[in-house]
């Protein structure tokens, strides 16, 4: 009598727990179904775009002909022509 | 009637999700925009000094998205140290805002910035690659 009761309880427990176990696994599998590569690429693109927007002033500064490099380091760079109005004329004495 | 009510009850959460999604991804809000403007103004003001220090070979860009003195001895110049510290502090704040807006990590933003800065470095300036300073 006791044995059959134990068996019944065991069967009932298995009947409840096993489906729950499988349901849990199935749920985990569904949650992990994202597309990380696509998301990463989109985020990288957005980050690059935001950085470019933020630092747009650098392009303007450099394009305005400001001296951006040491002439000694960059002999190919064009130098701004300095023509001060008060520059003394060269003496020929 | 019941069908209409049922339909609207089902569609409400979907609309709510659609409205929430952009903010959860960090759409720029007013606070972030103002903070970015403040950071941009400061960065723009410092930019000529940074360009000069770079052209003199005193500072360079590293691979983590920040400025660094090429030689430790250069940090004895307090103005230069302050320039580096201020710029890096603001960069970190900027990277944090962008990371928040795009729903990503600050380190990823910093790495993208490093890539950009190293690519934009001028001929003769120093960039730190593989832990060593190299002239571009």
Image (cartoon, coloured by chain):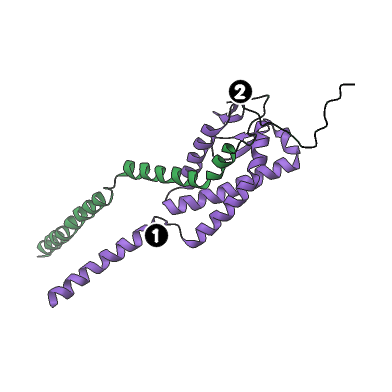
Chain colours: A green, B purple
Vertical relation: B63 (above or below) B17: above
State which quadrant residue B84 falls in. Answer: top right
- What chain letter is assigned to the residue under label 2? A
Q: Quadrant of residue B130?
A: top right
Q: Position of residue A21 (x, y in %)?
A: 21, 54
Q: Residues within 10 Å of mark 1 (few under 14, many from 20)?
A: some
Q: Residue at x 50, y 37 (%)?
A: B116
Taking the spot 59% from the left edge, 26% from the top edge, the residue there is B123
- Image coordinates for residue B58, horizontal then vertical, percent: 68, 33
Measured from the top left, where is residue B122 in percent x and y?
Answer: 58, 30
* Residue B6 locus on image (x, y percent): 17, 73
The residue at the point 67 percent across, 40 percent down is B49
Q: Is residue B15 left or right of residue B42?
A: left
Farthest residue to the bottom: give it.
B1
User: Tag on residue A76?
Assistant: 2
Q: Which sits in the foreground, B50 or B1? A: B50
Question: Regarding mark 2 in the picture, which secondary structure is present there?
Answer: loop
Marks 2 and 1: which is nearer the front?
A: 2
Secondary structure beneath dot 1 equals: helix
Q: Which of these two is toward me, B42 or B8? A: B42
Residue depicted at 49% across the width and 35% down the height: B115
Closer-to-camera residue (A32/A75): A75
Instruction: Reply above or below: B11 against B46.
Output: below
How far apart in space, not on screen, are marks 2 and 1 (Cα)?
48 Å
Give the chain of mark 1. Answer: B
Give the position of the N terminus of chain B as an image quadrant. Answer: bottom left
Tell whether B100 sits left or right of A24. Answer: right
Q: Is residue B66 above or below residue B99?
A: above
Q: Which residue bears the numbered disc 1?
A: B23
Instruction: Mark 2 and mark 1 in contact? Answer it, CB < 8 Å.
Output: no
> Badge 2, how many Cα within 10 Å: few under 14, some, many 20+?
few
Q: Nearer the viewer, residue A55 or B77?
A: A55
């Amino acid at each position: 009598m006791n044995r059959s009761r134990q068996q019944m309880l065991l069967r009932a427990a298995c009947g409840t727990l096993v489906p729950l176990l499988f349901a849990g696994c199935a749920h985990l599998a569904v949650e992990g179904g994202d597309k990380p590569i696509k998301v990463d690429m989109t985020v990288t693109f957005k980050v690059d775009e935001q950085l470019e927007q933020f630092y747009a002033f650098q392009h303007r500064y450099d394009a305005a002909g400001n001296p951006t490099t040491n002439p000694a380091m960059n002999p190919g760079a064009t130098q701004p022509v300095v023509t001060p109005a008060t520059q003394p004329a060269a003496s020929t004495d | 009637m019941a069908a209409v009510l049922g339909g609207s009850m089902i569609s409400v959460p979907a609309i709510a999700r659609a409205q929430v999604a952009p903010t959860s991804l960090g759409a720029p809000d007013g606070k972030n925009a103002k903070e970015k403007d403040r950071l941009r103004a400061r960065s723009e003001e410092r930019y000529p000094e940074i360009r000069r220090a770079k052209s003199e070979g005193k500072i360079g860009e590293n691979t983590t998205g920040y400025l660094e003195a090429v030689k430790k001895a250069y940090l004895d110049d307090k103005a230069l140290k302050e320039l580096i510290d201020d710029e890096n502090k603001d960069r970190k704040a900027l990277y944090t805002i962008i990371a928040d807006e795009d729903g990503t990590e600050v380190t990823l933003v910093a790495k993208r910035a490093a890539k950009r800065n190293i690519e934009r470095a001028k001929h003769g300036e120093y960039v730190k690659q593989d832990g060593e300073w190299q002239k571009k």
